[in-house]
């Protein structure tokens, strides 16, 4: 894996569990920073072999049928990255096709010794250390310690991202020159951003309910919905919403898109937004800020 980012003064690394997670969480951020000249690297930890296929005509790819979903989702990811403009994207340990989707807790796939959930933490983190030391990102974006919504692969991706950041900065660990990441963020959604989705007066709620059997109250129970006070950072990527929507459409097996509305799991749907939110867990806040005191640039304060 060669370094593609040396010419860019701003470099950002995203770590995700499965294909489609990157676009749902950070699609506008990725497209936006690329447009600004930053180098964007994406590491995806599994191929999503155990994913829920929402489209009947593609159901044969699922693990319960032909078990070809991982290969199919590789192609979906490549198509999505083409829409966002990301060229530096890789799977963790990709040469060995190392880690398989773990499925949900308590399921048979979760007991597979080859699944990501069973991976040795430092072994997997070392693979990411190599990327960090090669790409030298100033900014890392990952999930929170709940993995966003509690999926084992999301939790493991969080653990590995945080451990790799620690190990990469340790001059006594592994090979290559150490590199310390300046700022680390976890993806989140502030509670206020979802308030409109709980009111029947919102014009798209009736559409969501009719199209997707939407249950608004299920959203607020998800761990990635955070109190406004803990969400530190906002990226206004509304101008990149068309790219994000196009990338979402590329993930055909996982997402059902209707205009700017999408369904991504049983009875969970929402309106796609180009505004993406984060919790800063390493590094200092720096201007510019919005009226609520949130950072508007993940690179704010980073020395180039």
Image: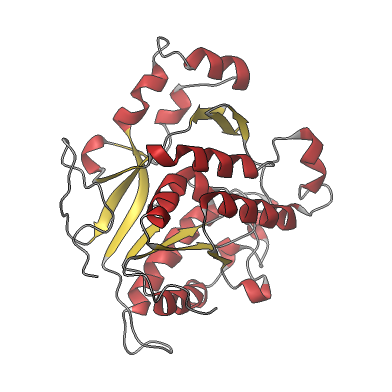
- Left or right relative to 71: residue 275: left
Q: Is residue 197 above or below residue 33?
A: above
- Whether 109 is drawn above or below 190: the answer is below
Q: Find residue 76 and report its horizontal and vertical position in percent.
A: 66, 51
Number of disc labels = 0
At a point 43% along the width and 90% down the height, the residue shown is 175
Position of 45 compared to 198: left or right?
right
- Point out residue 53 in the picture as x, y percentages from the top left corner: 71, 40
Closer to the camera, 41 or 221?
41
Image quadrant in which you'd find residue 286: bottom left
Location of residue 266 with respect to 234 vertically, above or below: above
Which residue lies at the image location 38% right of the left edge and 87% below the top edge? Answer: 173
Res 147 seen here: no
Give the residue at x 37% y 78%: 168
Specify the quadrant of the image occupied by residue 283: bottom left
Which colour style is shown? secondary structure
**Quadrant assignment for the C terminus:** bottom left
Is residue 250 visible from the viewing direction of this image? Answer: yes
Please tell me which residue is depicted at 56% across the width and 31% down the height of the picture.
262
Residue 28 placement, left or right of 83: left
Residue extending farthest top: 201
Give the quarter of the image for residue 239: top left
> Percent position (x, y) of residue 236?
32, 41
Quarter occupied by the N terminus: bottom right
Q: Position of residue 54 (x, y in %)?
A: 69, 35
Front-most of 173 and 11? Answer: 11
Is the residue 269 above or below the residue 89 in the image?
above
Q: Is residue 158 left or right of residue 151?
A: left
């Amino acid at each position: 894996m060669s370094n593609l980012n040396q010419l860019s003064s701003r470099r950002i690394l995203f770590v995700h569990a499965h294909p489609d997670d990157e676009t749902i969480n950070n699609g506008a951020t990725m497209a936006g920073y690329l447009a600004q000249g930053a180098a964007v690297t994406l590491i995806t930890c599994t191929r999503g072999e155990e994913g829920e296929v929402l489209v009947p005509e593609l159901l044969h790819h699922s693990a319960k049928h032909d078990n070809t979903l991982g290969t199919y989702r590789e192609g979906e990811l490549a198509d999505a990255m083409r829409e966002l403009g990301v060229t530096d994207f890789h799977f963790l340990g990709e040469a060995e096709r190392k880690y398989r989707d773990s499925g949900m807790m308590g399921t048979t796939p979760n007991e597979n010794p080859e699944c990501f959930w069973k991976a040795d933490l430092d072994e997997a983190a070392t693979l990411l250390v190599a990327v960090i030391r090669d790409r030298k990102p100033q900014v890392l974006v990952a999930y929170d310690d709940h993995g966003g919504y509690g999926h084992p692969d999301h939790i493991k991706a969080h653990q590995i991202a945080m451990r790799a950041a620690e190990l990469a900065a340790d001059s006594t660990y592994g090979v290559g020159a150490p590199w310390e990441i300046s700022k680390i963020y976890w993806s989140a959604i502030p509670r206020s951003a979802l308030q409109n989705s709980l009111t029947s007066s919102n014009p798209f709620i009736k559409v969501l309910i009719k199209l997707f059997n939407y249950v608004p109250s299920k959203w607020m129970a998800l761990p990635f919905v955070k109190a406004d006070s803990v969400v530190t950072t906002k990226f206004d990527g509304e101008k990149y919403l068309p790219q994000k929507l196009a990338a979402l459409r590329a993930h055909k097996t996982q997402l059902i898109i209707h205009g700017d509305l999408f369904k991504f799991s049983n009875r969970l749907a929402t309106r796609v937004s180009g505004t993406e939110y984060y919790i800063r867990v390493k590094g200092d806040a720096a201007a510019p800020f919005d009226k609520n005191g949130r950072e508007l640039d993940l690179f704010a304060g980073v020395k180039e």
